[in-house]
Image: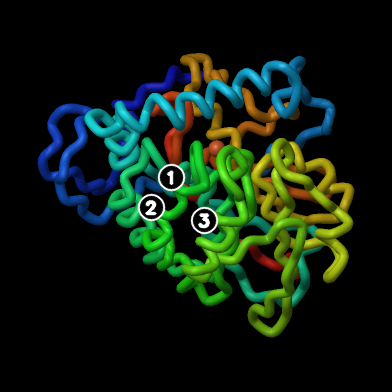
């Protein structure tokens, strides 16, 4: 595998990303005006077939390692970076230059016949708060909405350390609800880190982004309909599969922050699941191995297939712990879902 070289990627893949007016020192906080961001684009590889037997020795979803990581994460997010980020915020600097759009076209088995082609814009792991300038997020949201998606899904971890961080970006996210089939959210583990996550639900609702927590909705699109569902976070929430399926049966499209929900989703009969959480490893070594291994089943990023079920794992937009990424560039995903008929 070719070693990761961010400079090579910057030169070859970034089309016309516009820079801050003033910044010359990486990450130095500036009042410079942010221009529209035009992300670099790439196509995701076809689904990788998995067997369900791939797994890591340590289960990242529970146990002592998780407790230590969670508390360290909260400590840094709440008490260190709020001070540091007033002067130096390298992540927004990086995000503006390396944000990209990943694209995929999928025809999941079991997708309802007669549904018109559906363009889903999927944004996960925004991690509002210390690392992310709302003005930059606003520029990214505007550029993504120019893609005219039919539906927008926000896949959890809206915040980093506290639910109040959501308030900083609510107006920024409001344009997402202009999608004809609406904008939808599911909870991630960080949304439970501080305060009451219901505040996030209410805040998002105030800008017309609706939360699905162990529930589903039926959505008409092009003469037929499909079911969209959201399952609660695997680590910090209380996933309830029977609640999820009680009204409309198994969702055709499921928002599940943690990709380790995938095998339960398949057992439940879900054709397509959208996840994040892993940040694609966030920092990847030269041999491609991730520093942060958040999926017990090695579902790190990209598209996967197990039996007749498919999964998209996004690297996400934001950052945690370390205000940097290497080898796992920040992204949103545009998925075109086509009926198999
Ligand atoms: Fe995250």
Where ligand 1 lies, by quadrant? top right
Query: Is label 3 or label 2 in front?
Result: 2
Side (left or right) of 297 relative to 289: right
- Give the residue pinned by disc 2: 168
Query: Is label 2 or label 1 in front?
Result: 2
Residue 24 drawn at (x, y percent): 13, 31
The residue positioned 31% from the left and 45% from the top of the image is 133
For this orientation, the residue located farthest to the front is 195
Chain-order first, disc 2 or disc 1: 1
Which quarter of the picture shows residue 270? bottom right
Query: In the structure shown, which secondary structural element does the residue marked by tag 2 occupy?
Result: helix
Which quarter of the picture shows residue 264? top right
Give me the disc on residue 290: none
The residue positioned 68% from the left and 33% from the top of the image is 299
Q: Are marks 1 and 3 in contact (CB under 8 Å)?
A: no
Give me the disc on residue 334: 3
Chain-order first, disc 1 or disc 3: 1
Residue 328 visible to an observer of this rendering: no
Give the crowd class for mark 3: few <14, some 14-19, many >=20 residues within 10 Å. many
Query: Is label 1 or label 3 in front?
Result: 1
Distance from label 2 to label 1 (Cα)? 7 Å
Query: In the structure shown, which secondary structural element does the residue marked by tag 3 occupy?
Result: strand
- Give the residue pinned by disc 1: 128
The residue positioned 88% from the left and 57% from the top of the image is 242
The residue positioned 33% from the left and 56% from the top of the image is 138
Residue 301 drawn at (x, y percent): 59, 36
């Amino acid at each position: 595998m070719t070693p990761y070289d961010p400079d090579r990627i910057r030169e070859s893949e970034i089309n016309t990303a516009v820079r801050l007016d003033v910044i010359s020192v990486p990450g130095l906080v500036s009042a410079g005006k942010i221009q529209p961001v035009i992300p670099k684009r790439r196509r995701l590889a076809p689904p990788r077939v998995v067997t369900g037997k791939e797994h890591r020795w340590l289960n990242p979803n529970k146990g002592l390692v998780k407790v230590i990581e969670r508390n360290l994460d909260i400590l840094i997010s709440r008490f260190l970076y709020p001070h540091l980020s007033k002067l130096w915020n390298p992540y927004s600097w990086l995000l503006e230059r390396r944000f990209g759009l990943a694209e995929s076209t999928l025809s999941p088995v079991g997708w309802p016949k007669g549904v018109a082609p559906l363009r889903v814009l999927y944004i996960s792991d925004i991690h509002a708060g210390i690392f992310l300038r709302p003005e930059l997020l606003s520029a990214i949201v505007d550029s993504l909405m120019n893609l005219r998606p039919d539906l927008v899904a926000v896949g959890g971890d809206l915040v980093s350390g506290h639910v109040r961080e959501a308030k900083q970006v609510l107006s920024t996210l409001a344009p997402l609800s202009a999608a004809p089939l609406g904008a939808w959210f599911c909870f991630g583990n960080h949304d439970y880190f501080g305060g009451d996550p219901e505040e996030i639900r209410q805040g998002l609702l105030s800008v017309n982004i609706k939360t699905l927590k162990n529930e589903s909705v039926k959505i008409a699109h092009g003469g037929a309909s499909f079911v969209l569902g959201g399952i609660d976070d695997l680590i910090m929430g209380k996933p309830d599969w029977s609640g999820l399926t009680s009204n409309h049966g198994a969702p055709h499209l499921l928002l599940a922050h943690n990709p380790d929900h995938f095998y339960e989703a398949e057992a439940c009969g879900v054709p397509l699941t959208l996840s994040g959480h892993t940040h694609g490893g966030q920092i990847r070594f030269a041999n491609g191995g991730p520093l942060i291994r958040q999926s017990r089943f090695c579902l790190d990023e990209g598209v996967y297939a197990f039996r007749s079920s498919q999964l998209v794992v996004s690297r996400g937009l934001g950052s945690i712990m370390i205000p940097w990424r290497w080898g796992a560039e920040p992204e949103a995903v545009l998925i075109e879902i086509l009926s198999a008929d």
